[in-house]
Image: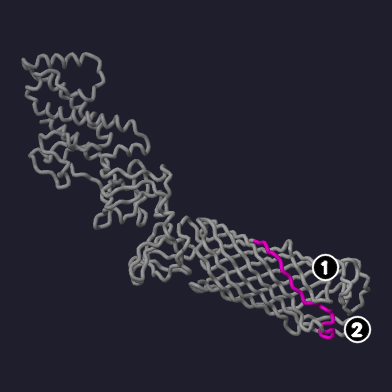
Amino acid sequence: MTRGLVLVLAFGIIAWAHPARAEKVKTNQDTKVYSRPGEQAKVLLKLHSGQNMTVIGKEGRWLHVRVQGRTGYVPRSKVDMPDDDEIQRNTRSRPFVGGRSTKRGFGGQAGPDDRIGADAVGEGQDDSSSDDDSDSKDSKDSKDSKDSKDSKDSKDRKAKKPHKDDSASDSDSDDSDDKPAKPRKPAHAAKPSSKDDVSTSDDDDDDDDSKASSSKSKGDKRDKRDKGDKGDKGDKGDSDDDSGDAPDPDDSKTGDPDDSDKRPTAHVSEKTVAYNDRSSDSGEEFVAKPSMVLYPGETKGKWTLVENDDGDAGWMLTSALDMDDSGGGGGGTFKRDLDAHALLGVMFIQQAMHSTGSTITSTSGMLNPDKYSLSTSAVSLSLGGEALFPYKKSYVVGGEATLDYAKTLFGGIQVPATMSTAAASTGISIANYNLRGEFGYDLHKKNGMMIIGRLGYRYQSYMVDSYSSTTKNPAKLPQETMGAPVLGASFAIPQLTEKIGLKFTLDTILFGAGITQTKGLEDGKSPSAKAATVAAELRYRWKKDMDFIGVYDLNYASLDFGAPAADSTRGHTGTDTARTDIFHMFTFGLIKMF
């Protein structure tokens, strides 16, 4: 009776000390295990429906799990969860003394409900159905308890009067006490020393010993198995527990492309709420910003389910989404760009003439044709449009056409008097036409950063009012046209912030400029030019398809006309005539996206 009480207490302590098992869930459909929350992340494993997984934690709509020796993330929607949305704890039903009996106490009363079930065994049944996944600690505790019990049984048998049939057994027991203790063999430690031991009055105890020996033997096997596993490799021992079809090959090892790279992407032009359900009255899931990359999914009615990079998902009005024709995700934000702009502003014009080796002596207050400076202001209008299209995964191609026009105000340029004419005001107008082809590289940043090369042609005209009248044009300014190839580049950040975008451009004329001036008013025999235009553009998002835009342009041109022409009436002297033009233009307006 005393020995039975000791055994019950010992195994009760072991069962009580056993740590809570890891939390388990099971997939309800085929799914993928990702390296981080969000379906655009790298795929680690592909699982079939019914696959068991160990839950490490929860992050929003994602579960952090361990399966097949790896850890990753799966959507909660693809996992069977309890009705209360709590993770099910894998506390398997087991008898009061693990693997022994469904009853407890000395009167054979039934155990509590949570200690019976598929894992419980009836009294006297074999323990072969006990949990194969018991921790190595259970095996060790079971072994220590058995050793203690065997030692006590040996002492009890010595204290009893020997049975005539037990003489051999007792003799063996005494001999074992006289000899030094030897390590016990896990599989045979509890075997009877002779066949006669089975017939002793301690049949029940020996039967218990046999069961304990069986449990210990299994525990030792698990010890050997666990001893060879280190780190995450230890999880492979749960492969039997993680039932279900074997997972598909790991994309990260086979080198297959990630499916998420092929998903379409979208953006919003202003802050937009994604809701829990297809109603603006439902709860808010997250707020989408223009800088976010969104991944649209199923569409129902006028609503589309979208997901962001953090793995949050919600319903949004389809009309609020700007679909990216480039698709593919990958962090890039470029999409097809078709726009047209109209801007108004002001231009400040500066022009300076100078001659090398001039023989004209300057007269105070009088115009010197070899050396003078003129300046004026003009109202300006800028019109244009641009089209950019994605090319392959990282490139964009397209073109741009613009017209910048300026007309002087308040009478135009104030020209000083000459020896033969009085001072006068001369009106001028400047038209600048640009046609460019563009080829760029998408840097795949969330702000849409791109670098674009530009190659085109510029035609510029410099028109003078009443250019043939010496009274209205005492400086004899000629009308002038210039055509030249233009080579340039631009750097764009369309989404610097939620509302702000930036663009910088540089265009240059380095060679091939052709200049034509009014016959008889030429500045030299062999005109040439080099020029550069620097522009900075600031955009402010006003509406979904319309932005406010402000642009500053600095045009610098250096013209060399060579030696004065003999048949020109400009009156230049010296060996070389040159001119510098500087135009500052500030324009503001609207840009419409299509």
Marker disc for residue 420: 2
> Quadrant location of residue 158?
top left
In terms of depth relative to the viewer, which is nearer, 67 or 438? 438
User: SS of the residue at dot 2?
Assistant: loop
Q: At 35% across and 67% down in the image, what residue appears?
A: 283
User: Mark 1 vs mark 2: which is more N-terminal?
Assistant: 2
> Can residue 480 be found in the magenta stretch?
yes
Left or right of 104? Residue 412 is right
Label 1: which residue? 561
Which amino acid type is shown beneath numbered disc 1?
Phe
State the image coordinates of residue 83 (x, y, percent, origin top left).
24, 57
Q: Nearer the viewer, mark 1 or mark 2?
A: 1
Q: Which residues are magenta?
A: 469-488
Which residue is depicted at the point 36% across and 57% down? Answer: 60
Q: Residue at x 41, y 54 (%)?
A: 260
Mark 1 burial class by Cα count in 10 Å: few <14, some 14-19, many 20+: many
Which quarter shows the N terminus?
A: top left
Residue 510 vs 94, above or below: the answer is below
Q: Does residue 63 appear to the left or right of 9 in the view shown?
A: right
Residue nearest the viewer, comparing 95 with 497? 497
Q: Is residue 334 above or below residue 519?
A: above
